[in-house]
Image (cartoon, rainbow, N blue to C red):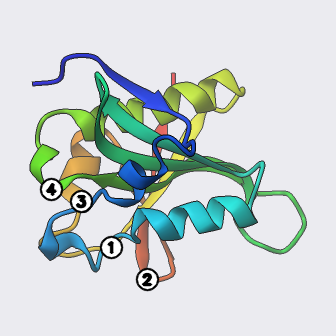
Amino acid sequence: MIRSPRLAEITPDNFDAAIGLRVRADQEHLVAPVVKSLAEAYVYPGIAWPRLVLDGDRPVGFLMAFFDIDWKGDGSGTDLRSGLWRLNIAAGEQGRGYGRFAVESVAAEIRRRGGTVLTTTWHPGESGPERFYLGLGIRPTGETSGGQTVGVLELR
C-alpha cells in the first residue's frame, strides 16, 4: 500500500539506489536499466526528465519523461510531443500503485508545461505493460516507434 509517494531528482545521494532498481526478470528485455536512462538524460539535457519514485524515503521506481521532442525527427518541429520515456518499477513493488503514481506525475508535469497529450511507447507481449497502460486510459495510436506500440493519453 502506498504511503506517501513522491518524486525526487537524481542526486549523488540517491544515485546508487536509483541504478540498483531492477524490474522483474521476465521484464528486463522490455525496459532499459536505469543506468542507461541516466546516461541518455545526460546526453539529452532539457528534454529528459529523470526522477526516482520514492515511498517515504524508500526507492520503489524510476521514471524518465521527455518534453517537446521532434517526434518525426525531421527538424520541422511540426510534431512536438511530450510523455513518458521510461518506467521501471522495482520487482517487489509492482501492483501497488507506484506505476499509476508515476504516469500521473508525468501527466501533471506535462500539463504544468502547457501540454495536453502524454505520449508513451511499450513493447508488445505477454509480460509487457500494455494492460497497465490501457487501464490508465492510454490508447494506441496505430503508430510504432522502434518496434514499440505508441500510445497517447489526452490530458484534461
Label 1, label 4: how far apart the Cα atoms are:
18 Å
Nearer-the-camera pick, 129 or 20: 20
Amino acid type of the residue tagged 2 in the rendering: Gly
Residue 136 visible in the shown view: no
The reply, left or right, for residue 111 in relation to residue 103 is right
**Tag 2 and tag 1, C-beta contact below 8 Å:** yes
| Residue ID at (41%, 75%) | 148
Sequence order check: which comes first, mark 3 or mark 4?
4
Label 3, label 2: how far apart the Cα atoms are:
15 Å
Using the image, tell me which numbered label, if any, was put on residue 3: none
| Residue ID at (52%, 25%) | 108
Which residue is denoted by mark 3 in the rendering? 129
Which residue is denoted by mark 4 in the rendering? 91
Between circles 4 and 2, the one closer to the viewer is 4
Between circles 3 and 4, the one closer to the viewer is 4
Sequence order check: which comes first, mark 3 or mark 2?
3
- Could you say whether the residue bearing mark 2 is in a helix, strand or loop? loop
Between circles 1 and 4, the one closer to the viewer is 4
Q: What percent of the width, then of the height, locates residue 130?
A: 24, 59
| Residue ID at (45%, 43%) | 14
Nearer-the-camera pick, 109 or 42: 42
Which residue is denoted by mark 1 in the rendering? 123
Label 4, label 2: how far apart the Cα atoms are:
24 Å
